[in-house]
Amino acid sequence: MIDFSGSETRITDSTLVIGLVLPDVMGTYGDGGNALVLRQRARLRGIEAEVLPITLADPVPASCDIYTLGGAEDYAQRLATRHLSKYPGMQEAASKGAPVLAICAAIQVLGHWYETSEGERVDGISLFDLTTAPQATRSIGEIEGRPLIDGLTQPLTGFENHRGGSTLGPAAAPLMRVTRGVGNGAGEPVDGVIQGSVLGTYMHGPALARNPELADYLLAKATGRELEPLDLPDVELLRRERLRR
Ligand code: GLN
């Protein structure tokens, strides 16, 4: 596992603390990179920021300013679900408005329940009003779409690989209308979910490296301030390459 904290990690009262939740079991396709992107975009604006990895050996603290969770295969996903149910620190923080970013399997864990590819139903932690069941085929490939939430204007891009399809209930809204790929799978061509301060997507990538506007949307919520734009030509180049067919 990558050492996300770094040897010089120093957390003070003014540090923006980015909780990287269970990178030991949830982090397929480099999803831990989302925490690094948040840290870097904060630091480039002079905001002190650190990544706090929270593993299966740690209770989940309610004190982080923002939380990120990555994707996982079925068994790892089960371990994560059990841990988050036992230590509901993230749920407590989210109920007070802390932003949470959930990728792929994490959407499923944060829903009411999900069914594994073996057909077993597992209770989630109900941060999202949604349920997940296996689709007839696995969805694999590039995914793109138009954001459906206020504050985002740029097309979103990522890579999806999941068997589960998620059906949103009335309290949950989709993140984007899909123009390429599958997304949530069940029903309308939409991807992801937003409910209060909690946001989910099937986009790996890592999603925030590909979608800096989404990174800044979460960062603005976590810091409670308006952020000045960053001019980063390399990040723009990456986006242009990803969006080129
Ligand atoms: N196990 C889940 C599924 O297949 C999630 C996979 C993932 O996170 N890539 O739906």
Image (cartoon, helix red, strand yellow):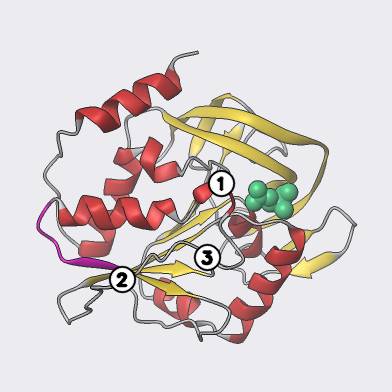
Residue 229 vs residue 190, the one in the foreground = 229
* Magenta-colored span: 45-50
Q: Residue 133's x, y, as percent? A: 79, 51
- Picture layout, residue 65 above or below residue 58: above
How far apart, in angstroms, are the residues tagged by discs 3 and 1? 11 Å
Dot placed on the residue nearer the N-terminal end, 2 or 1: 1
Magenta highlight: main SS: loop
Badge 3 density bin: few <14, some 14–19, many ≥20, Cα 10 Å: many
Q: Which residue is mark 1?
A: 29
Quadrant position of residue 192: top right
Q: Position of residue 53 (x, y in %)?
A: 43, 72
Residue at mark 1: C-beta within 8 A of ligand 1: yes
Q: Which residue is mark 3?
A: 23
Whole-angstrom CA distance, mark 2 to mark 1, is 24 Å
Query: Do labels 2 and 1 touch, CB within 8 Å?
Result: no
- What is the three-letter code of the residue carrying label 3? Pro
